[in-house]
Image (cartoon, helix red, strand yellow):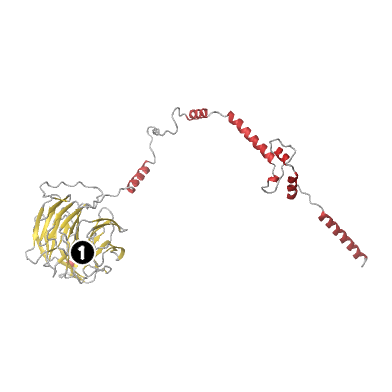
Amino acid sequence: MTHGTAHNFVQEQIELDECLNNFCEEVNSSVEPRWKRKALAARTPKSSRKRNRSGKTPSKGKSTPQHDRFIPNRGAMDLANAHFNLMKENSSSASNQSESPTRAEFNKALASSMGAGDSRVLAFKKKAPAPPEGYENSLKVLYTQNKEKMSRAQKPVRHIPSAPERILDAPDLLDDYYLNLVDWGASNMLAVALGQTVYLWNAETGGIEELCQCEAEDDYITSVKFVQEGGGYLAVGTNFSETKLFDVETCKLLRNMDGHSSRVSSLSWNQHVLSSGSRDSIIVHHDVRVANHKVGVLEGHVQEVCGLAWSPDGQTLASGGNDNLLCLWDARFAGEGARSQQTANVVQTPRLKITDHLAAVKALAWCPHQRNVLASGGGTADRTIKIWNAANGANLHSVDTGSQVCSLIWNPHEKELLSSHGFSENQLSLWKFPSMARVKDLRSHSARVLHMAMSPDGTTVCSAAADETLRFWKVFEAANPVKRTKRVKGAATASRQGLARMSIR
């Protein structure tokens, strides 16, 4: 080992010894270790601890220990100092409270500062002070609108009587599902076909008048329909394939129109054009203004056409038949172009042919609230009411009624649909549209309710059933009710179960 190497070795040994000495020295800290504090607390007698909690002022020189974090350790807390500070705050608050004014003085000062005098701020028995003269609320219009909306939202549910208002005898009313024997005109006249005779009942006076009667023994009335505007003309279909037009006021036959080879079971008006459906499965358009009345023929059904209904806008004709078909036809086949030809325009394909029903389709009704919405009802094997979009043939809703659907009428004032039924319930049912929830059933007839007709004011519905009675129901309610005209005292009346009962013949 050289001299330089020995010197370096000795130097490293000296530095190592110094590091070991520094490492072994005790570390000085202001915070005593926990084991020392616990040992100190164990050596302190209990009597001295009680003296420190007695409330004596601790020495000012004693410093409160400082810690870098909160550790809930009662042994490290200065409970005597905390008790002294707490007692000092309580004594100061008590002295301040003794100097504060009484409650009565405070209320008096508050009232004088508000200038209210003897009046109270909150008085449950007194009205609010009136606004100054000439003051106008800027939100008055807004409050009025909210009040109107609230009144509409809280509209009470109307009462629908469960019993008919009036009952009329209708002897010899044919029990035939495919016929249409009752209609109510705009002149407030009710036309009823009983066997071979058509009777007119005046709803205002209660008077009854015979309009016409079939001459042949085998002939009988199969359909009746008032013209839509005015109600002064009545179309009548017979079993001998004739379509007749009568003047209601004079009870005279205006003309007799042909075109069918079998009974005329359904009729529908579109202004001056009368459409007739027959057992021969065709539909004929008659223009009642011209001599050559036959202006159109529709061939799309294969069995009897028992339901016809023109849309309110006069653009689409709906037809239902015993072949379970629902057909939609355009109005152009009964227009000016058809009349200009020497022969009637024959159409063999409808615009839409719907085959969803499983039985005869007689009940047809166009919605007055929504364009191109059509309701149809099926017979005993179908028992459903279906809502259609006539523009594209889409089925909007279908509900199983559980009974044969004979007739349909829309409420002109509310979105409701009234249906009459046959086997097996023989009731009238009111439905909410578009949910088609059943609102109420009206049960009074003892046989199937074949026909329905609505009064001109849209409030009363007449139902005709195979039990040979006509029953009048106050089922709808007008938006602006109109007072009814008093009936003539000389009208024949009788009483049955508290209901007025009259004979139509």
Dot 1: few (<14), some (14–19), or many (≥20) neighbours within 10 Å? many
Q: Is residue 247 visible?
A: no
Q: How many marks?
A: 1
In the displayed orientation, state which residue is furthest to the right. 3
Looking at the rendering, which quadrant does residue 212 occupy?
A: bottom left
Which quadrant: the N terminus?
A: bottom right
Image coordinates of residue 230 in percent, x first then y, are: 16, 54
Who's the residue at 55% across and 28% down the image?
Answer: 101
Image coordinates of residue 412 in percent, x first then y, are: 25, 54
Please name the residue that numbered disc 1 is placed on. Answer: 308
Between 299 and 63, the one lying in front of the other is 63
Looking at the rendering, which quadrant does residue 377 occupy?
A: bottom left
Image coordinates of residue 293 in percent, x first then y, are: 13, 65
Between 165 and 234, the one lying in front of the other is 165
- Direction from residue 473 to residue 64 in the image, left or right: right
Q: Amino acid at mark 1?
A: Leu
Which quadrant: the C terminus?
A: bottom left
Image coordinates of residue 398 in percent, x first then y, are: 30, 63
The secondary element bearing badge 1 is classed as strand
Looking at the rendering, which quadrant does residue 260 occupy?
A: bottom left
Between 500 and 372, the one lying in front of the other is 500
Residue 56 vertical placement versus 378 (above, below): above
Q: Is residue 402 visible?
A: yes
